[in-house]
Amino acid sequence: MFKFMPLRNRSGQGMVEYILIVIIVVTIVFIAYKAMGGAVQKQFKEAQKNIEQAAD
């Protein structure tokens, strides 16, 4: 007969969960960058322009 033996070595499970969390975080950051990247870049350019004008 086949005996059910529970998995005793679950050390790989923690690593898989960690990798999944990293993938989810990277995906969220990528989506946020795509959604707001243009606005942030515009603000940095405006700040650079203001700094250059103040230096003159």
Image (spheres, rainbow, N blue to C red):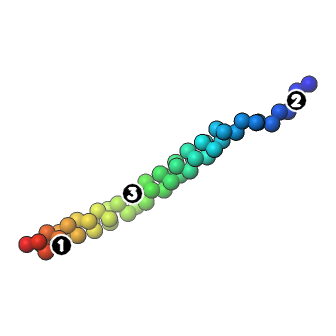
Q: Could you tell me the amino acid type at mark 2?
A: Lys
Q: Position of residue 41 (x, y in %)?
A: 29, 62
Q: Neighbour class for label 2 at 10 Å: few (<14), some, many (≥20)?
A: few
**Residue visible at 45% across and 56% down?**
29
Question: Considering only order in the chain, which callout, 2 or 3, is on the residue closer to the N terminus?
Answer: 2
The residue lying furthest to the top in this view is 1
The label on residue 34 is 3
Per the model, the C-alpha gap separating discs 3 and 1 is 25 Å
**Residue visible at 23% across and 70% down?**
47
Q: Could you tell me the amino acid type at mark 3?
A: Lys
Q: Position of residue 53 (x, y in %)?
A: 12, 73
Which residue lies under the disc numbered 2?
3
Q: Could you tell me the amino acid type at mark 1?
A: Asn
Q: Secondary structure at mark 1?
A: helix
Q: Position of residue 45 (x, y in %)?
A: 22, 65
Q: Nearer the viewer, residue 13 or 36?
A: 13
Query: Which quarter of the picture shows residue 19?
Result: top right
**Residue visible at 88% across and 29% down?**
3
The residue lying furthest to the left in this view is 56
Instruction: Relative to 45, say whether 13 is above or below.
Output: above
Q: Secondary structure at mark 2?
A: loop
Quarter holding the N terminus? top right
Question: Considering only order in the chain, which callout, 2 or 1, is on the residue closer to the N terminus?
Answer: 2
Query: Which callout, 3 or 2, points to the residue nearer the camera?
Result: 2
**Residue visible at 14% across and 69% down?**
52
The label on residue 50 is 1
Query: Which quarter of the picture shows residue 35?
Result: bottom left
Query: Which callout, 3 or 1, points to the residue nearer the camera?
Result: 1
Per the model, the C-alpha gap separating discs 3 and 2 is 52 Å
